[in-house]
Image (spheres, rainbow, N blue to C red):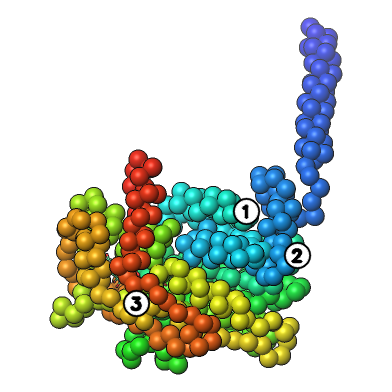
Amino acid sequence: MVDKPMSIHRTRFPFSITKLLFWSLILLSFIVLFFLGSPPSSASPSHRRRSLRGGDWETSVRESAKSKSLRVLVTGAAGFVGTHVSIALKRRGDGVVGIDNFNRYYEASLKRARSNLLAQHKIFVVEGDINDGSLLKSLFKLGKFTHVMHLAAQAGVRYAMKNPKSYVHSNIAGLVSVLEACKNANPQPAVVWASSSSVYGLNSKVPFSEKDRTDRPASLYAASKKAGEEIAHTYNHIYGLSITGLRFFTVYGPWGRPDMAYFFFTKDILKGKQISVFEGPNGRSVARDFTYIDDIVKGCLGALDTANRSTGSGPAQLRLYNLGNTSPVAVSKLVRILEKLLKVNANKKLLPMPPNGDVFFTHADISLAKKELGYNPTIDLETGLRKFLDWYMDYYSSSSSLPKRAW
Ligand SMILES: O=C(O)[C@H]1O[C@H](OP(=O)(O)OP(=O)(O)OC[C@H]2O[C@@H](n3ccc(=O)[nH]c3=O)[C@H](O)[C@@H]2O)[C@H](O)[C@@H](O)[C@@H]1O
């Protein structure tokens, strides 16, 4: 009786050891096979994952950056302005590498579609966040960028009340991360980046000049862009980075942003849904200096082409320009143009502007950009909206459902 259980133990014990050894060997061989199968890479584990997903990542970056003229890293390349600027640069023979985190602020499918368009133009876009310092370091090492067009940002004025931290993450921490990478890079690139007309905030002197006050932002978005301008000053002052800030004025056009009024007004008018048109005090109209994307692209290229080299330390170029259209249009007029072009009457509701961070009007003085960048906007709102609607109809006709608002 005593021997029996012992004999059972004796037979069970070696069996468990064998089983354990067997499964350990299987596991070990899987691990060995996995590492032997991975392409050699000096990058960190997160970059290795990227190369596994995106093929030969490093070669793609090198190829995409190759150029005899500018070699440009475009942040926010799958964004509205980023896509247009990247294509324009590539078309004229510059090397372009994009980076974009494809966040879900608005329909991700639109960002993917823009990215496919970039791929057709042989522009490689790395999927990653500008806050990932080690990724930026690898990118600079591979791309040897002469210029950075920094367009990645959390956009939108009203959304800042919903998700304030996203503005700190992208527009402040993200900008610092990009400038840190630029300052450490060899060669040190010249930086051109997107500020915003919103920095003029409660300024009432028109047209808005670069010399005007910008210390009264009306939204956290505006405050984050104003902070960016101050941060740019610091990096220029200490590290000799050549930095140019561009204050964009309500940019619109094909491949635009669905969170912007002209875009979702179009969608809602076509659906017969009511739109809210904001008014100023005493029924005064709210107006914007709407600027067509092709004009903005020319301004961006002008800024890149006139940028001096970074100096590493000591004095370097620090510039700020308004890029607007310099002919403000009332939002009620924007709606009338859309009604005319769409041949549909909008179901509109006039509302006093809520305290949402919006300002009553914007109007750019563009004389400085004209003089120094050769900037010369030519597209009026109706012409630009016609081009936008052509794209919109074409883009969404192939899709069964119209875009959804995610904000
Ligand atoms: O130029 C800029 O600085 C800014 O331009 C736009 O901001 P915004 O001019 O407010 O553009 P929209 O959000 O498209 O609004 C356009 C106008 O429509 C009005 N609006 C908006 C929404 C709405 O439901 N009804 C309405 O009348 C707004 O008050 C505003 O006057 C962009 O969204 C910002 O990212 C950019 O930085």
Marked residue nearer the N-terminal end (1 or 2) = 1
Determine whether the residue tagged by mark 3 lies in a helix, strand or loop.
loop
* Left or right: 73 as drawn, with respect to 252: right
Which label number is shown at residue 289?
A: 3
- Above or below — where is 279 with respect to 12? below
* Left or right: 262 as drawn, with respect to 133: left
What is the x, y in percent for residue 401?
34, 43
Determine whether the residue tagged by mark 2 lies in a helix, strand or loop.
helix
Q: How far apart are marks 1 and 3 (CA)?
A: 34 Å
- The quarter in which the N terminus is drawn is top right
What is the x, y in percent for residue 141?
75, 65
- Observer-nearest of 272 and 224: 272
Q: How crowded is mark 3: few (under 14 residues within 10 Å), some or many (20 or more)?
A: many
The structure residue drawn at horizontal position 79% and vertical position 38%, both measured from the top left corner, is 37
- Above or below — where is 269 with respect to 69? above
Of badges 1 and 3, the one in the foreground is 1
Which label number is shown at residue 122?
A: 1
Q: In which quarter of the image is residue 334?
A: bottom left
Q: Quadrant of residue 143?
A: bottom right
Residue underneath mark 2: 141
- Observer-nearest of 5 and 230: 230
Marked residue nearer the N-terminal end (1 or 3) = 1
* Left or right: 320 as drawn, with respect to 215: right
What is the x, y in percent for residue 270?
24, 52
Q: Could you tell me the amino acid type at mark 3?
A: Asp
- Above or below — where is 284 with respect to 333? below
Of badges 3 and 2, the one in the foreground is 3
